[in-house]
Image: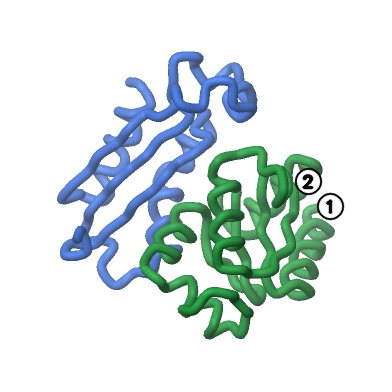
Chain colours: A blue, B green
């Protein structure tokens, strides 16, 4: 399973998102120092820089930092396995506008 | 060792009203996400202390553990963790960052 699918599986199971888009933007960071950090983990073809847009009921009533902490916590294993940057847009239903 | 780093961070964020843990320096950011936050703070006219985590691996690792936040940059205002690049950008675009700075008594040069 590639890193995009790992992230999708974790977030889908834990948050049951109403909307979820995951983009692997690793190619835009080719040559970036962070990509050379963990040669054993980060494949040259991608898997280090991701952008996630996620709408879920779980975020209702939570501030921005708490939402990010929730997602970062769910993906702690993925960070350990080579994810270097994760751009997050985390919305509760009704905030999409 | 961890305690020393935490103590240093605690001192930094209490001695300086606005601290940005970043890659590179405010003049020469070494990462697009750090650069974005620097640009936002400059646009608001906020004075801040930039701490280059690339020049000190113990701080780079230490601030992630201190904040329980896995990525850099990290913005602190009056000792309080505000967030990373995405949060700072969202708050800036919605106008919240301007009012947040005002609430915290941090001077900005642009009107909220």
Work out whether A36 lies above or below B15: above
Residue A66 seen in render: no
Query: Which label sits in the foreground, 1 or 2?
Result: 2
Give residue B58's mark: 2
Q: Does residue A71 sit above or below A7 in this rendering?
A: below
- The residue located at (60%, 72%) in the rendering is B80
For marks 1 and 2, give the CA distance: 9 Å
Q: Residue drawn at (53%, 35%), measured in percent from left and top?
A: A84
Q: Quadrant of residue A80?
A: top right
Q: Position of residue A93 (x, y in %)?
A: 17, 62
* Element type at mark 2: helix
Q: Which residue is mark 1?
A: B1
Vertical arrangement, residue A96 with respect to residue A29, above or below: below
* Image quadrant assignment for residue B104: bottom right
Q: Residue at x 49, y 16 (%)?
A: A43
Q: Are marks 1 and 2 on the same chain?
A: yes
Say if residue B39 shows up in the picture.
Answer: yes
B5 to the left or right of A6: right
* Image x and y of residue A9, in percent: 27, 35
Structural crowding at the residue carrying mark 1, measured as other residues with C-alpha within 10 Å and reported as few (<14), some (14–19) or many (≥20): few
Place of residue B40 in the rendered image (x, y in percent of width and height, measured from the top left): 54, 59
CB within 8 Å, label 1 to label 2: yes
Upstream in the sequence, badge 1 or badge 2?
1
* Circle on res. A38: none
The subunit carrying tag 1 is: B
Q: Is residue A47 left or right of residue A19?
A: right
Q: Secondary structure at mark 1?
A: loop
Q: Which residue is at a point 48% across and 71% down the rendered structure image?
A: B97
Q: Nearer the viewer, residue B13 or B36?
A: B36
- In the image, A27 versus B13, the foreground residue is A27
Q: Position of residue A92 (x, y in %)?
A: 23, 62
């Amino acid at each position: 399973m590639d890193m995009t699918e790992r992230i999708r599986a974790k977030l889908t199971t834990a948050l049951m998102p109403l909307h979820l888009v995951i983009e692997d933007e690793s190619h835009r960071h080719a040559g970036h120092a962070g990509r050379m950090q963990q040669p054993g983990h980060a494949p040259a073809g991608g898997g280090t820089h991701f952008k996630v847009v996620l709408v879920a009921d779980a975020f209702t009533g939570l501030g921005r930092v708490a939402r990010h902490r929730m997602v970062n916590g769910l993906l702690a294993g993925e960070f350990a396995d080579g994810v270097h940057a994760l751009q997050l847009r985390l919305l509760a239903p009704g905030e999409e506008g | 060792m961890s305690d020393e780093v935490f103590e240093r961070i605690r001192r930094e964020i209490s001695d300086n009203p606005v601290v940005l843990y970043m890659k590179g320096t405010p003049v020469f950011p070494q990462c697009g996400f750090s650069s974005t936050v620097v640009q936002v703070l400059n646009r608001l006219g906020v004075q801040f202390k930039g701490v280059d985590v690339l020049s000190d691996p113990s701080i780079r690792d230490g601030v992630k553990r201190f904040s329980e936040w896995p990525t850099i940059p990290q913005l602190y205002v009056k000792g309080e963790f505000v967030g990373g690049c995405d949060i700072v950008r969202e708050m800036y675009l919605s106008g919240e960052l301007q009012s947040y700075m005002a609430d915290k008594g941090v001077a900005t040069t642009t009107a909220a």
